[in-house]
Amino acid sequence: MGPLQGIRVVEMAGLAPGPFAAMMLADMGAQVLRIERPGQLSPPGHPRLALLDRSRSAVALDLKSAAGLATLQRLLDGADAFIEGFRPGVMERLGLGPEPCLAANPKLVYGRMTGWGQSGPLAKAAGHDINYIALTGALHSIGRKGEPPAVPLNLVGDFGGGGMYLAFGIVCALLEARQSGQGQVVDAAMVDGAASLMTYMYASHAAGAWSDVRGENVLDGDTAPWYGVYETADGQYVSIASAEPQFYAELLRITGLAGGDLPDQLDRGSWPAFRLRLAEIFRGRTRDAWCELMEGSDVCFAPVLTLDEAMAHPHNRARGTFVEVAGVAQPAPAPRFSRTVPATPTLPEAAAADPTGVLSNWGFAPHEVAALRAEGAFGAER
C-alpha cells in the first residue's frame, strides 16, 4: 500500500533528519531497512516510542568487519535508494562512497543528509539545527522586536529543511532514474533547505517589503494587529490571521469593532495602539468562548493547542490527522492519496539477534546469513 510500494531503501541509523526522511518514505509504502550498530537501541529506547523509526525493519551490522561491509554492499546492490547522514568522507573511508556503490548499482539513488553540505568551507564542521538556520537568515527573522531571535524548535533545519528535502530529492531522483536508468547523489544540506524555505521572505526583501529588523514584518506576528497571537481570559492563547480585507471585516464584526471610528487596516502608524485594543478585547473572554465565536468563521482563527489538545481536537479527529499505534498516539502519514492509500504505521523493528528473517527479504539465504554471523558481520553474539 502507498505510492512508493516496491521501492527498496537502505537507511543508516542516525538522528532526526535522516530518520525523518526514511519515515516519510516508509509511510508512503517504501520497504526501508535500517542499518544499526551492534547493540544500538533506537532512541528513546523503547521501540513503540521511536516514532521516527516506524514502519521499518532493522539489522545490526559491524562495519568494522569485512563481512559487515560486504553485507551492506550487497544490500545496496539490491536497493533503489540509500540514506546516510555522516559527515563528508565517512562513507568514502569505509569504501562505500557514491563512486563504488553506483558502479555496482548504476540505478542507485545515493541520499546524503548533512547540515552544511558535501562541499564548502564548513562542510566538515560540526553543527546543529540552530546553526544551520542561523546562517540562512531564518533564525534572525523569527522573534519579537528588541528581543533575541526565537528558536522555532528544530522544525526549520532538521525536519523542514533537512529530512523533507532529502525525501523529496530521493523521490525526484527515483523518477528520473526510471527514464535514464541512472542513479545519482542527492546532496541534501539543512542550510540549503532552510534557505529554500525562506524563498518568499527573500522575494519580499528584494521588493523592499521585508525588513531586516526583527518584529517589523507582517508575518512575524509582532507587528500587524490582525496577524498574531493573543492571550485570553483563562491564560490560554488564540491565533488570528485576518490579513485580507474580507477577513479583517469579519474580525471587526465578531469583536464588536465594526462601524467604529477605525484607521485604515494598512495604516502602520495605528497598529501599536490597535494591537493593544485587540489584546484587551481578547482578554475579555476565555479561549473556549472565542472558539465558539470564531472557529470555523472567515476570521482565519484557531486556538493555540498543546500536543494533547491537538490530538483531541474535533477537526483533527475527523481528518484522522493522528493515529494510534500500540497505544501511542502519533501523526498519521501525510499527504493523502485517493488511490494508493498509505497503510497505518507499524512499530519499528529493533535489530534482531537473528537477522535471517529480515535479510531473507533482501535475497539472503539462511546459510548465507549463518556464514556472515560466523564471520562477525553482525558483531559479537548477544
Image (spheres, rainbow, N blue to C red):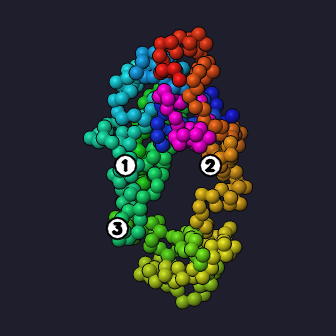
**244 and 99: which is toward the camera:** 99
| Residue type at tag 3 | Val
Q: Judge the density around disc 1: few (<14), some (14-19), many (≥20) Cα neighbours within 10 Å.
A: many
Give the answer, above or below, for where 12 lies relative to 15. above
Locate the N terminus and report the quarter of the image it occupies: top right
CA distance separating discs 2 and 1: 26 Å
| Residue type at tag 1 | Tyr
Residue that numbered label 1 is attached to: 132
**380 and 289: which is toward the camera:** 380
What is the span of residues highlighted in magenta in the rendered image?
33-57
User: Residue drawn at (43%, 22%), measured in percent from left and top?
Assistant: 63
CA distance separating discs 3 and 2: 35 Å
| Residue 343 position in % (x across, y down) | 69, 38
Residue that numbered label 2 is attached to: 331
The residue lying furthest to the bottom in this view is 261
| Residue type at tag 2 | Pro
| Residue 36 position in % (x across, y down) | 49, 29
**166 and 149: which is toward the camera:** 149
User: Residue drawn at (33%, 42%), measured in percent from left and top?
Assistant: 126
Based on the picture, tell me whether residue 46 belongs to the magenta stretch: yes
Kindly tell me whether residue 134 is visible in this rendering. Answer: yes
Give the answer, above or below, for where 23 lies relative to 201. above
CA distance separating discs 1 and 3: 20 Å
Residue that numbered label 3 is attached to: 213
| 56 to the left or right of 187 | right
| 366 to the left or right of 196 | right
Q: Secondary structure at mark 1?
A: helix
